[in-house]
Amino acid sequence: MKFAVTVTLKKDVLDPQGKVVSQTLKNMGMNNLSQVRQGKFFEIDLKEKDSSKAHNQVKEMCEKLLVNQIIEDFKISKTE
Amino acid sequence: MKSSVIVFPGSNCDRDVAVALEKLQFKNSMIWHKENVLPKSDLIVVPGGFSYGDYLRSGAIAAKSNILNEVIKAGERGSLILGICNGFQILIECGLLKGALLRNSGLKFISKNIFIKIQSNKNKFFNKYKKNEILELNIAHNEGNFFTDKKHLNELEDNDLIPIKYCDKEGNINQKTNPNGSINNIAGIFNKNKNILGMMPHPERMVDKTCSNEDGLPLFLSLMN
């Protein structure tokens, strides 16, 4: 069972990389851009058939290692 | 005094700390991260470097290593723990210190000498310095931009838990004298009981006049006091 996890900085945390990317895109002429936030993406493949069990396991991985919850938010979605 | 320096794959300031400690006659042991037992130590140092290549987040992987379980237990028992640079990042990732160290606001790795001002000397780490003393130390980091929530920041400010702040040669603490964007110019913080210190500047690089200055030496002398 495959899951996708995206990790992004929380709304109130300054994201200097996102800001630079956003400024560069604006310089390239994409003027309708309001904001870019940069983050991380994990693809997690689990040997587990029960989807709610698997989801909980991925959540635990996020909370214990993948995400620093003081500064980051995460989203989990099932891909396969 | 007995000390232990924890060594991870990618640590690169471990031997510098050992030289500083041995100069002051600490009986020091180097402890590999896979060990499950920590020798009895008056001081534990988590040194700087790039543990595990800074994968995932700086310090995140090292914070889950075998020996860190023992360091956490020792810290909770009240042992003195000093985390320098990557060591500070590891102490935050393992939960011994609160907050986060974000990427430098200028997006560049900074390696240079900076100035810090002693905010508080009533503790085990800075008692050989005078209050408001200005030191010249070296920083070398990419993620030293300390950040925390308002509640914790107030707790730090109100309880004398910020012993050092970035300043200029004259001691001015403001945005201009802040090298990395760190909130309130914070260069290092204590836990509640002040037995655990995390700091970005490297005191171990400033212990010998022949290659630098000796502004870091009183920190190690303070620990013996």
Image (tube, coloured by chain):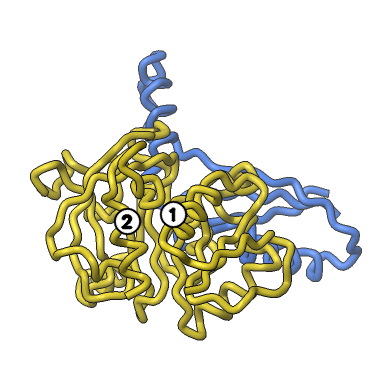
**Residue at mark 1 to residue at mark 2: CA–CA distance:** 8 Å
Q: Amino acid at mark 1?
A: Ala
Q: Secondary structure at mark 2?
A: helix
Which corner quadrant holds the C terminus of chain B? bottom left
Evaluate whether residue A69 shows in this view: no
Q: Which mark identifies residue B217?
A: 2
From this view, report whether residue B25 is shown above or below residue B69: above
Q: Position of residue B121 (x, y in %)?
A: 21, 70
Q: Nearer the viewer, residue B10 or A57?
A: B10
Q: Amino acid at mark 2?
A: Leu
Q: Nearer the viewer, residue B116 or B90?
A: B116
Q: Residues within 10 Å of mark 2 (few under 14, many from 20)?
A: many
User: At 33% across and 34% down in the image, what residue appears?
Assistant: B112
From this view, report whether residue B159 is shown above or below residue A42: below
From this view, report whether residue A42 is shown above or below residue B198: above
Q: Position of residue A67 (x, y in %)?
A: 58, 57
Q: Which mark identifies residue B103?
A: none
Write down the residue under mark 1.
Answer: B20
Q: Is residue A9 left or right of residue B12?
A: left
Residue B124: quadrant of the picture: bottom left
Asked whether the beta carbons under mark 1 and mark 2 sit within 8 Å of each other, the answer is: yes
- Please report, as a chain letter, where disc 1 is located: B
User: At 28% across and 48% down in the image, what residue appears?
Assistant: B214
Evaluate whether residue A25 shows in this view: yes
Q: Are marks 1 and 2 on the same chain?
A: yes
Q: Earlier in the sequence, mark 1 or mark 2?
A: 1
Q: Is residue B95 left or right of residue B60?
A: left
Q: Nearer the viewer, residue A3 or B65?
A: B65
Q: Which chain is blue?
A: A
Colour of chain B in the rendered structure image: yellow
- Please report, as a chain letter, where disc 2 is located: B
